Amino acid sequence: MRTFKYYLKRGIVYFLTVGFYVTSFAQQKPKPNIVLILVDDLGFSDIEPYGGLDLKTPNISRLAKEGTIFKEFYNNSICAPTRASLLTGQYPHKAGVGYFNVNLGLPAYQGFLNKESLTLAEVLQQGGYSTILSGKWHVGDDKDQWPAQRGFERSFGFIGGASNYYEINDSANADVQLYRNNQPYYLPRDKYLTDAITDNALGFLDEQSAEKKPFFLYLAFNAPHWPLQAVPADIAAYKGVYKDGWDSLRVRRYRQAIAKGVIDRDQALAARDTVLQPWNKLTYDEQQYWQYRQEVYAAMIDHVDQSIGRLLDKLKELKKDQNTLIVFLSDNGAQGGNNLRLYTQRTSGPVGSAGSYEVQNSNWSQTGNSPLRNYKGTPYEGGISAPFIAWWPGSVRADKIVKGTGHLIDIGPTLYEVAGVKYPVAYHGLKVNALPGQSLVPVLSGKADTVSRKDAIYWERGGNLAVRWGKWKLVQLANTPRKYELYDLSADRAENKDISKLHPAVVEQLKHLYNEWALKNDVVDYSRLWPQGNLGGGERRL
């Protein structure tokens, strides 16, 4: 006869067994190493896994094939606000970078990360991680706002929003302003900045390997952000690839994105931008010129992919490749449209060379964002949609495409869960901002196929606003403050058809949600900030 003690014993064993199987994603293995790779101004289809088969990105393609990719992952449309959200898990205004890395006079627009919004490095460091940055910072210009002061134990790169890729002056008058662990660093002549960023990252990993603890590496490439400068051999590899021009390529990429599964077959291609010049109307010499510009741009992306290959080799050399999570994404879409800026007055050499200060143009940028609408700096899909790839052998599902929406604010909760690190309620005596995002571990680990998102996602930058809630997306542009556009992204991700007049109740509901979010995140009417300079405040109302 089985006694009470027998059943009690069985119950304890059952409880412990169940407890083991429901432990967190992080606890199933030793703490993983984490590499967060951010590229700059990369369009939605500017890599092979998202339709850019004209580009050679075998290492990024490997991450996608052996990992999980998102069909719909969102950034904040432009450099500094994206980095603010990525690093803190907050909406950019809550982190202090609601506009850019300039101070507009209010805490939400101070232009650098506030102390109440903890960086990934600060949180992971408290959880036993070594913390490393190599690349672009752009969320605080003054030295007390630099990476070393925000949790990064090792750091290399530049502080501002853009940099030349080659040094053309001497160390006494350096053109490329770099630092290494808070000290000035001179980029050797003929050294390509992407290589310097990679070299320092790999060197830091060699140093860190002796510490016997996991590492967090934030690898923030500035490529393919302007200026258009690339390695000659990489440029040569793309000779003739773009002879058919941007009109046909953007259609091919649209079809390839469907074939890859990142765009649904019933989705249309975004309407042709009116700034797009017909390729067949250009002269032979004009076609040669524009081909070469795109060859340079492709070469910059290619070199980033080569660098990721070097990273993968280093992880294998250090025997850390099987327990390292790699996340790859872009800070915004390709640059073009009204956000296009030309610096020809600063150019002292041909496109692609060390003296070039040319910018990617709208003609090729619409191809880069194909099949989505518009460009960097706007809340249309082409401005805020990014490739997102997660790779971790044996822990993140291989060759999987995730449905549903992810956002930058989700990366913090995701990394903290996989690292088994608790996000604090206070830090150095300050109450910290709570995290508004959600962990993506369920879809990465295979427990779910679709991101289950209850809350809407919001954008505001320079007076351009948007709300994404389920299939609905509301857009309002700064230059048309009384016009509201509504799109059903389940049927029209290209945002070709404004259906706001057909669904006025949905418009009002999304406006209400936005107003609540704006009040909670200290978002103010942009017209009161700039250019009038009236800093009186007042939340942004739709």
Image: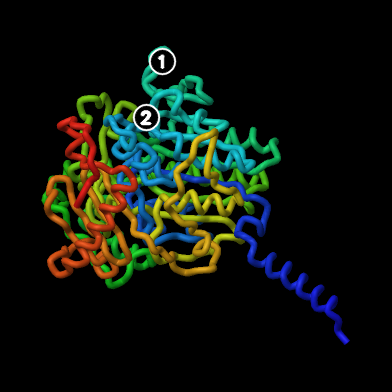
Residue positioned most to the front: 4
Q: Residue at x 41, y 50 (%)?
A: 408
Q: Nearer the viewer, residue 70 or 26?
A: 26
Q: At numbered mark 1, what does the secondary structure look like: helix, strand or loop?
A: loop
Q: At numbered mark 2, what does the secondary structure look like: helix, strand or loop?
A: loop
Is residue 302 visible in this depiction of the protein? no
Which residue carries the number 1 mark? 170
Mark 1 or 2: the one toward you: 2
Q: Residues within 10 Å of mark 1 (few under 14, many from 20)?
A: few
Measured from the top left, where is residue 347 in percent x and y?
25, 26
Which residue carries the number 2 mark? 160
Q: Nearer the viewer, residue 103 or 358?
A: 103
Residue positioned most to the bottom: 1
On screen, 449 above or below 278?
A: below
Measured from the top left, where is residue 18 in percent x and y?
68, 70
Q: Residue at x 14, y 49 (%)?
A: 481
Q: Residues within 10 Å of mark 2 (few under 14, many from 20)?
A: some
